[in-house]
Amino acid sequence: MEDFYQKCAEHGLKITPQRRIIYEELMRAKDHPTADAIYKRVRRKLPNISFDTVYRTLHLFSEIGIAKLVEGYGEDRRFEPNLDQHHHFRCLKCHAIYDFHCDSYDELPLPEVVRKYGLVVGKRVVLEGICLKCRK
Amino acid sequence: MEDFYQKCAEHGLKITPQRRIIYEELMRAKDHPTADAIYKRVRRKLPNISFDTVYRTLHLFSEIGIAKLVEGYGEDRRFEPNLDQHHHFRCLKCHAIYDFHCDSYDELPLPEVVRKYGLVVGKRVVLEGICLKCRK
DNA sequence: TACTATATAGTAATCATTCCTATTTGTCAA
DNA sequence: TTGACAAATAGGAATGATTACTATATAGTA
């Protein structure tokens, strides 16, 4: 919650109940939710909130660096609150995403060849497969 | 082109001019094109082709394994013809994607922890940053 | 407390994606 | 080679996520 107040101040953003509650709800989430999923959860506390506010606010959060947009294959956009360096296992069948940590992945050296493309600011290993539930 | 005929046969799919030309156009592409981009290129040869056919066909190709859907952040879906093991550098500004090869990335061992999530069938390192063009 | 720029609610517009149906075509067997 | 049929296509319509718009409300500040 400190991050939230600090980043908002940094970017000159007002603290509104909507933003506070959307932030809380995203932080609580463990399922890489879509804007619509967060909207449904937030409405329990703010029944009059509009979808547009939730949608804009999540994207705003990802712009100021208190949330992240998760890579996907063109399904609905998903967000995650986890800003730590971590990696993803994605189920090709049910589209579930599981976070995992792996020190050796974190420390991967950048190959020489990427220098000619640009400056790297982020790195993630994405493993794809079939999750245990879907294997049955 | 051999792959195309073989995979179609394997899956009981008919060879149509549309499919052949969409396949050729995708193979030629070096820019991870969207369905719409391929549609525009294919129309030069088949002016009456419908967008739906291009769209469906590209997804079909990715299902039978002669094309791949590229991971993204919710922009339009993009396809690539490159089936070799490779990795991506993505520009956060202009959304360009560059392929690169890296043996040490290819050989990354799977961490013990992913066993509890499922069976891994694919692996990719995604580097994000700002490409040279956008740095100016 | 009053002011002002910012944010929100509610709704409308946009655009990629998907679905539907009549027609056409590739494939295979006679 | 021809005929029959399942599969594929064109064209357009429906869907659904995303984005834009505007009048009203509110947070932050003097």
Image (cartoon, coloured by chain):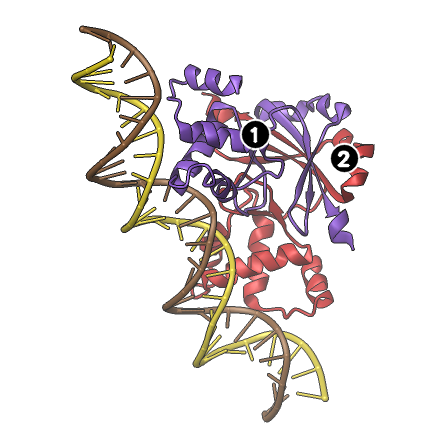
Chain colours: A red, B purple, C brown, D yellow
Q: Tell me the quarter of the picture where residue B110 sits.
A: top right
Image location (x, y in percent) of residue B59 = 46, 33
Is disc 1 on the same chain as disc 2?
no
Amino acid bearing label 1: Met
Indicate left or right for A107 with A3 as reference. Answer: right
In the image, residue A54 above or below residue B116? below
Identity of the residue drawn at 53% across and 33% down: B25
The image quadrant where one finds the N terminus of chain A is: bottom right
- How crowded pointer 1 is (Cα within 10 Å; few <14, some 14-19, many 20+) is rated as some
- Residues B30 and A65: in front is B30
Q: Residues within 10 Å of mark 2 (few under 14, many from 20)?
A: some
Which quadrant of the view contains residue A89?
top right
Q: Chain of mark 2?
A: A
Q: From this viewpoint, is residue B21 visible?
A: yes
Circle 1 chain: B
Q: Amino acid at mark 2?
A: Asp
Residue A78, image x and y in percent?
Answer: 54, 46
Q: Quadrant of the C terminus of chain A?
A: top left
